[in-house]
Image (cartoon, rainbow, N blue to C red):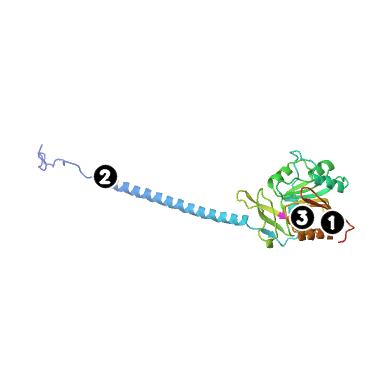
Amino acid sequence: MAPAGVPSSTGGLPPAVGPALTGISFFGYKGSWRRTIISAMAFLIAFCTAMTMLLIWSEVTDQRRLAFDANMTRDYVLDSVSMDNPQLVAYIRQVHLKPTTHQDPLNATQTSEEKYVTTLSQGKREGVYAEYISRIGAISSTAWLESNLSWRGVLILTEPKNFFEAQKSTRNSRSRVLHACLSTDTDTKEIKYHQESEVQVTKLGDGPNSLVSSDEGFPTTRLKCFPLYSVLLAYNATILDYLSLDSPDAPDGQVLDTIPWDIIRISILSIRWSPHHSEAETKNFIDKMTGRRYKLVHKTDTGKWIFLYNTLLKN
């Protein structure tokens, strides 16, 4: 074999000794680098797109949350809708007045108030009532009248649990239950409501709207507040044998102020009147009821005042 660099006997150069850089390996390296760059760019684009979408979603979510919070803390008032508006009355009747389903037995233990009402009404059968309860732990004063004297009426409850329990009970098939509060003026409202807290609706000009308690631990929902007159029209009852208002403090007196007394006739009326009212407030309320031809005839041991309609009283 000839030494390197010396022509062989055949006249050709011998093969090179050592590694040699070929064209194929150079272009393969260049293609691999290009694929790496493309993959990195694709990842970067996908990452930026995902982050942009995440930021947009977060912004939209924040806006929705702020809108929801604003809605939950704002009162809405239909101040241009009259209490006897046919569409409002039909809405209450068709959407909110619920019949009972007769799934659970009705607790019909006679209360002292029902006993007194029975005496005043002379044991009347098939009477008509309206009862409003917004006080936590209050016991209905119409269940015994329904079970034993076949009374019927509309039961207005603010607490969802109490509403669902009443709806499943074996009350009169002609009775209706309503999850709502009663408005303190002639307007229909929608207010924020913390479940399991007492509702104390005030007129818009009187300050914060709705709650005795604002404990943030309670679930917050929306609650409709209808004028009592609208509810009675929806139930087709403008003549009542008995109206019971069991709500804390002054709002009950305000509820009574919304009633068109020249149209509505109520024989017996009971109302929770707080002992925290001043003597002047109490006297003013009794004088107002006297002007409506009602006489205070009884005070129950549970803090309810019972009035009886008397045609002989001056109005």
Element assignment for label 1: strand
User: Could you classify mark 3 by the number of other residues whose Cα lies within 10 Å: few (under 14), some (14-19), or many (20 or more)?
Assistant: many
Give the camera-side residue of 81 and 132.
132
Element assignment for label 2: helix
Location of the N terminus by quadrant is top left
Magenta stretch holds residue 196: no
> Is residue 312 shown above or below 128?
below
Q: Residue furthest top?
A: 1
Residue 160 appears left or right of 27: right
Magenta stretch holds residue 228: yes
Callout in the foreground (1, 2): 1
The residues tagged by marks 3 and 1 sit, at their Cα atoms, a distance apart of 19 Å
Nearer-N-terminus badge (1/2): 2
Give the camera-side residue of 96 and 226.
226
Residue 182 appears left or right of 25: right
Residue type for callout 2: Ser
Nearer-N-terminus badge (3/1): 3
Residue type for callout 3: Leu
Element assignment for label 3: helix
Q: Are marks 3 and 2 in contact (CB under 8 Å)?
A: no
> Is residue 250 shown above or below 149?
below
Callout in the foreground (3, 1): 1
Residue 208 appears left or right of 36: right
Residue type for callout 1: Tyr
The residues tagged by marks 3 and 2 sit, at their Cα atoms, a distance apart of 92 Å
- Residue 178 in the image, given as x and y percentages of width and height: 73, 49
Q: Which residue is mark 2?
A: 25
Segment colored magenta: 225-229
Q: Which residue is mark 1?
A: 294
Residue 228, label in figure: 3
- Residue 140 in the image, given as x and y percentages of width and height: 76, 45
